[in-house]
Amino acid sequence: MIHSPRVVERIAELIKLAGVSSDDKIQEMTDHYLSEIEDTVALGITEQKAIRDTYQTIARTDLKSIDQNEKKKKKWIIGIISITLLCLYFTFQCKNTPQLIATTANEEFVEIPNGWPIDSDIDQITSGFGLRTHPVSNTKRFHKGIDIKASKGTPVLVTGDGSVSEAGYNPSSGHYVIIKHNEQYSTRYLHLSKVEIAKAQTVEKGDVIGLVGSSGISLTPHLHYEVIKNDFVMDPMEVIAP
Amino acid sequence: MDAKNKFLSGTLNTIVLALLSENGRMYGYEICQKTKDKTDAAILLTEGAIYPTLHRLEKDGLINSSKEKVNGRIRKYYSINDSSIVEINLQIDLLTQFTGHLRSLLKPSL
């Protein structure tokens, strides 16, 4: 009777109800309680009573601690997955780390113009990106790029592959060049003393497109450099490779 | 948790290792019964205490397990992992020494 499938099944069922979920552990606990019944019967107690007493013992016992290791493991796995997802989220949020970013539309990778726009050792930024007092008008204005001080005639280098979308002159920008790199990025180079490329010409990163000057509204020779992403200016320092 | 259980919680690992060292291989119920017999039922190991201890010791590599068919069902036997015998003996010695010190502190006359 002790070993009838009905008794064995009932014991396994009660163990499960007491909080054990792994099959391996249910099997081990079933052996435990069947051993207990066998011992009690050996002491002279009827099988029926021994079985009933053990049923009651299991029903009264909390066996959750036996399963604890497994639950802890599950919590760990959930924790690791959450941290990984958070890291991925922040990587894509952070603008200055990735050299390549995925466009949501077609999952293609877009190259960011990340070069330094001047061929000179004295790379000196005299005015950063953002709100500043304009050196000529003396009023607060938003500065759409960075100003890099350099002597007249210093070669100006294109910061990424692309093609010339504009090369010309106007009274405020002086001689200037605009390069379209891809669907997302364009760069602008202002106040040049000389433009050395023509509209529609293709350029490779590092090509000389002109020379530093002080044309347009400018006090001293310098390069004004802008990065435009999706029609909005952004801080070039965020994309220039260190 | 009563006082006896509080004492047990820190020593259960070592008790189980000592029983396995002495008896070769044992299964969970057997360990409970052996403890009960040896201590005149002063120490009763519950299922909720003994099995997590056995599983932890196995995971830590101190003991091994094997399965065998007994009375038409599967029984899981535990035994000492031979490569951990030095560490196990050290644990047993430390606890034996510790209980000696405890005795001299609690009942200095003995």
Image (spheres, coloured by chain):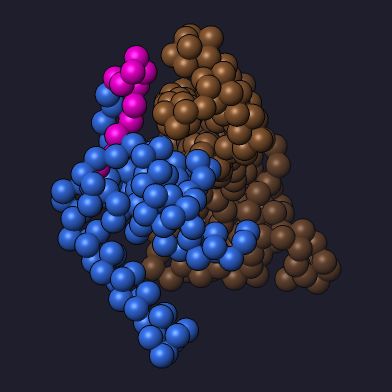
Chain colours: A brown, B blue
Give the farthest residue toward the front.
A44
Indicate the position of residue A8 as horizontal and vertical percent values: 49, 16
Q: In the picture, which quadrant includes the C terminus of chain A?
A: bottom left
Q: Which of A53 and A127 is in front in this view?
A: A53
Give the residue at x 33% y 30%: B76
Q: Quadrant of residue A205?
A: top left
Q: Mark yes or no: residue B88 visible.
A: yes
**In the picture shown, does residue A95 fall above or below A153?**
above
Indicate the position of residue B64 as horizontal and vertical percent values: 26, 40
Magenta stretch contains residue A105: no
**In the picture shown, does residue A81 fall above or below A30?**
below
Q: In which quarter of the image is residue A63?
A: top right
**Drawn side of residue A73 relative to residue B81, left or right:** right
**Drawn side of residue B64 relative to residue A216, left or right:** left
Indicate the position of residue B78 as horizontal and vertical percent values: 29, 39
**In the picture shown, does residue B86 fall above or below B51?**
below
Q: Magenta-highlighted stretch: main secondary structure?
A: strand
Give the farthest residue toward the top.
A5
Give the residue at x 23% y 46%: B23
- The magenta stretch is B69-79
Indicate the position of residue A59 as horizontal and vertical percent values: 65, 30
**Drawn side of residue A187 relative to residue A39, left or right:** right
Q: Nearer the viewer, residue A194 or A164?
A: A164
